[in-house]
Image (cartoon, helix red, strand yellow):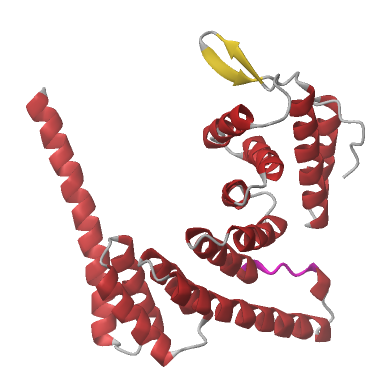
Amino acid sequence: LISGVLLALTVRTALRNRDWQDERTFWRRVTETSPRSVRGLTGYAIVLADNHCLPESLGYIQRALAIAPKALPTLIEAGAIYRQAGQNQRSQELLQRAAVLAQEQTASNRVWVARHGGHPEDMVDFTSAEVAAELGQTCLADGQFDVAVEQFRIVRRVKPTDPAAYLPLAVAQRAAGQSTAAIRTFWQYTFIAKEPTPGYKALLALYATSAGSNCTLRAEQDQVRINASCPQVREDLCAAQLEMAKLLADAGFTVDAHHAAQRAQTKFGCSDASP
């Protein structure tokens, strides 16, 4: 049995290594056949960074930036790679440059849409949200917690249906000492995440150290659970659900916003359940 398990693990490791080698070989060949391909250089840099070959990755991303200093995808990936390498200041510089370019690109696109009879006000700036997500991670890693919160709020505003837009914000709010806001954002994460356990565990820890009501937690079958009947918890649940309803409505998710408002009223008994 032990030899069978070892064999399975060996085969699985070999397959992972082969996948890595195949991907690495592909992108390396792209850079060899097209040495000025920004996409190829960036792709190879990403693969190298993902596999912890950071000095080599930085060399390729620097080559890509030298060829196309205003290439948004490359700037965003460069910011992530420099952060991974522990160079937060350089990461922030690149991502701030990307943020400006993203705003200029969005403004230009909206002008074009308006000229062609479209509705520029309906355009969603996903690129700026992508930049904000990376910039938030860099600021979080650098201890700039309030700035990280601002950036992650941008992501949540643009992508209110994406669980990944909530967890980093809650983590940043907790790090910034914004306990109440963090609790409510963690609740929002649990509302929509397929696997809400990380959010629930964070809520347990926050309620355990909260200076508010002492009824927020209760023992149940040798486990500590959140007491949903506690007034403080209900207040947090209502505030979280109603804020989510407003976020959804502002982003144009009218049906989802209506459902969120209904849940606030029927499930949590919130008095003001209008999104």
Where in the figure is residue 194, as x and y percent of width and height? 56, 36
Where in the figure is residue 216, as x and y percent of width and height? 68, 23
**Residue at the image point whose x is 52% and y is 87% from the top:** 70
Q: Nearer the viewer, residue 14 or 227?
A: 227
**Residue at the image point whose x is 45% and y is 71% from the top:** 77
Residue 266 is covered by the magenta coloring: no
**Residue at the image point whose x is 17% and y is 38% from the top:** 9
Q: Nearer the viewer, residue 65 or 115?
A: 65
Q: How many marks?
A: 0
Horizontal side of 132 relative to 227 (left or right) equals left
Horizontal side of 50 relative to 20 (left or right) equals right
* Magenta-drawn segment: 122-126
Quadrant of the image containing the N terminus: top left
Instruction: Using the image, determine if residue 193 lies above or below residue 36.
Output: above
Q: Is residue 31 visible?
A: yes
Horizontal side of 160 relative to 235 (left or right) equals left
Snapshot quadrant of residue 225: top right
Q: Nearer the viewer, residue 260 or 173?
A: 173
- Magenta span: predominant SS is loop
Outermost top residue: 221
Snapshot quadrant of residue 274: top right
Instruction: Using the image, determine if residue 263 lies above or below residue 165.
Output: above
Where in the figure is residue 84, as x and y percent of width and height? 38, 64
Quadrant of the image containing the C terminus: top right
Q: Is residue 37 visible?
A: no
